[in-house]
Image (cartoon, grey):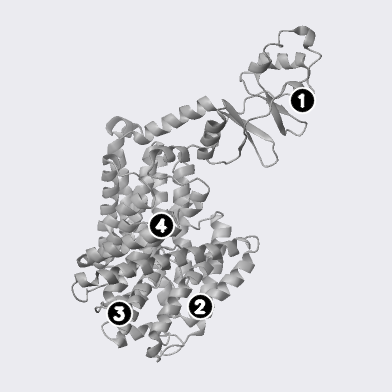
Amino acid sequence: MAWKETHLTDKQMTVILAFMIGILASMAAYILHTLIHQIQAILTEGFEVTSFNWLYLVFPVIGIYLTSLFVRHIVRDNISHGITRILYAISRKRSRLKPHNCWSSVIASAITIGFGGSVGAEAPIVLTGSAIGSNLGQLFKMDNKTLMLLVGCGAAAAISGIFKAPIAGLVFTLEVLMVDLTMASLLPILVSTITANVFTWLLMGGNSLFSFHMDGAWQVERVPACVLLGLFCAFISLYFIRTMTFCEGIFAKMKNHPYGKLAVGGIMLSSLIFLFPALYGEGYSAINILLNGRTEADWDKLLNNSLFYGHSNLLVVYIALVLLTKVFATSCTNGAGGCGGTFAPSLFIGGFGGFLFARIWNMQQIGVYVPEKNFTLLGMAGVMAGVMHAPLTGIFLIAEITGGYALFVPLIIVSTVSVMVMSIFEPHSIYAMRLARQGKLITHHTDKAALTLMSMDSIIEKDYLSVAPDMPLGKLVNVLSRSQTVFIPVLDNGGRLLGSVDITKIRHIVFRTELYTKFTVSQLMVSLPAVLYTNEPMEEVMKKFEKCNAEYLPIVDINNKLTGFISRTRMYAMYRKMVADLSAE
């Protein structure tokens, strides 16, 4: 630390840390993918493709149970909803993530997905990369603004490492994590994404996650089909988010019954995977079949290991059923105690949705022929953009991981239409909606970002003297002489707030000693224009101050017990400082 203070500026140190984050995040991504593939290879070796396998009913439940034991007894912390957890840390915890997040999600998600959990590895690895950035920043005593940037570097490096998509990593940080793009933030994020990309190539070779060869050049006559696909993707995204939220609500009601959750979620998940083996794990192998199929025999491989094997005439029905049930499989995996994200499921559903749209379009001869492989790719971008409210991430991620830059124009059309339509029904992404409802989501809007980063804990004042309602005026004057604040709350014996004493309204009697025994506090107190509640969003706090034009407002809990007060002067001073910090380059 002493050498750093002497020889390096903060900007230089930030770039060095970004480089280190890129290396560590790419290694974490490599370890996670290796663990998942090794576990899956061991468990599924020897499966017959021509018949169903009863072990599909067992493996997912075992994986979820082992994951829940690991989380409950070793991690002892909630590690679900990885990207939402990052957003919460940025907005409410000054970008501080716990040290165990650097490794716990890797192990937990490897067990869950390896045993067949129908979730993705991307959210856990993004949480891991962000935690690496946060903890490195804390280790080297970086300020809060730099910590936020390093968290973004970790997320970008994780996306770049797991997908070999550096540009997608950059725009993901801007669109999803809401890290502002400035010249000061651009260089470190680029350093981390490029570093992660290079090291991933060294560790895993140059093969992309998905292999794709475009089936015919894009034609302008296919614009109507692309627009309609974007609309279809928007409604798939809406179905995905609404169903996921509904299922999460059901499992949340069972939070005190872990074995009940395991039984309900495990049985549902195992049954779905038994019927539709394409739901096993991340499902990327199924997407590759859709992207690389040339004949009906190739696409019929999707029916392997299932009850549908040998019934190629039911391929469209199978794909439609898989599309509809994937969200339930993902919800059951996480709800039952597994660990994984919704990144891969959105790609999976998008790919199946794009293929289904193109197959029905061509079967019904609605318009010009559309290549089903190409529309599989476009569907992946459209649904991911709609679910995440991140059109640029969808466009660049799909283009980079498949080398499909020749489809750049239709990718833009489908992703843009999907996000525009989706925004009508859901204003926030699946990651941000939980925090947005609580007013805890940081955005690119500087004023709102400042209010989000502020918290009651940073401006609450607890140094005050209270009085009882039956206290005579003479004793009240004594309290006023000792008080360091103008806020004098009136509390009952249980600490509940009854009102306050306004010094300006009693000054005409405080010097008249003959009245000291004739008046009590209950006769002199006034009602408060408004009260604040614990953990109330700062935007609402600001609105209450503006509405009642008060100089101070008390904070109470649900039982109306006073916990402190907020001064208007202190609140605005903190707000101005936050805005200045966010606006500084």
Residue 377: quarter of image: bottom left
The residue under label 3 is which amino acid type? Ile
Q: Name the residue under label 4.
A: 423
Quadrant where the C terminus sits is: top left
Q: Nearer the viewer, mark 4 or mark 1?
A: 4
**Residue 491: percent from left, percent from top:** 73, 29
Q: Which of marks 3 and 4 is in front?
A: 3
> Which label was assigned to residue 272?
2
> Which label was assigned to residue 469?
1
The residue under label 4 is which amino acid type? Ser
Q: In this view, does 234 lie above or below 437?
A: below
- Cβ–Cβ under 8 Å for marks 1 and 3: no
> Which label was assigned to residue 491?
none
Q: In this view, does 577 lie above or below 223?
A: above
Q: Nearer the viewer, mark 2 or mark 4?
A: 4
388 or 151, which is in the foreground? 388
Of the numbered discs 1 and 3, the one sitting upstream in the chain is 3
Q: Distance between the residues labelled 2 and 3?
A: 33 Å
